[in-house]
Amino acid sequence: MKQYQDIATMLLRLATGANFLSPVASRLGFWGQQSSGWDEFIVYAGQVNSFAPQNMIYPLAIVATLLESLFGVLLIIGYTTRWVSLGASALTFIFAMAMTYSFGIKSPLDYSVFVDCTSAFLLATQPSYRWSIDEWIVKKIN
């Protein structure tokens, strides 16, 4: 049974990391014609953060993009997974609350933001992270 848990944890880590990197790739144009683009993302960030002053939208968009990129990469390689997962969970919870405030509950449900939040939190509760840099570090120390 432990083997299945290890595989499930690895897949959860990879899928959660990919869920952070794909939107970043879209806003930076890496998905080609299917990309949303940076300008469209800024408009969307302004809509999601409708409560924020207009001069804060661009910095919020940059911070969100940097955090999503960092969390995505660190989750995929499995480095400081527990802490990164907690940060990813907190970030997606903030996204969900902002979306709920600005658009209503349907929007974060449609975009599975609560699922992303809880999957990151579930990942933080795992006892170990096989096939990760975290595991390599633990083995090297011991």
Image (cartoon, grey):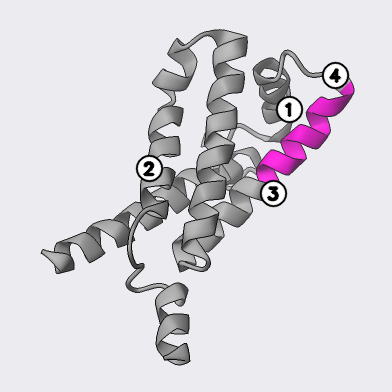
- Residue 63 inside the magenta-drawn segment: yes
Which range of residues does the magenta coloring cover? 55-66
Q: Quadrant of the C terminus?
A: bottom left
Identify the residue shown where x is 51% and y is 68%.
79
Looking at the rendered structure, the kind of residue marked 3 is Leu
- In front of the other: label 3 or label 2? 2
First in sequence: mark 4 or mark 2?
4
Left or right? Give the position of 62 relative to 125. Answer: right
Look at label 1 and name its amino acid: Ile
> Which residue is under mark 2?
119
Circle nearer the viewer, 1 or 3: 3
What residue would you read off at disc 4? 54
Tags 1 and 3 touching, CB below 8 Å: no
Q: Quadrant of residue 13?
A: bottom left
Query: Which one is earlier in the sequence, the residue at label 3 or at label 4?
Result: 4
Q: CA distance from mark 4 to mark 2?
A: 32 Å
Instruction: State how far apart marks 3 and 2 are (Cα).
Output: 20 Å
Residue 45 placed where, x, y %? Answer: 69, 25
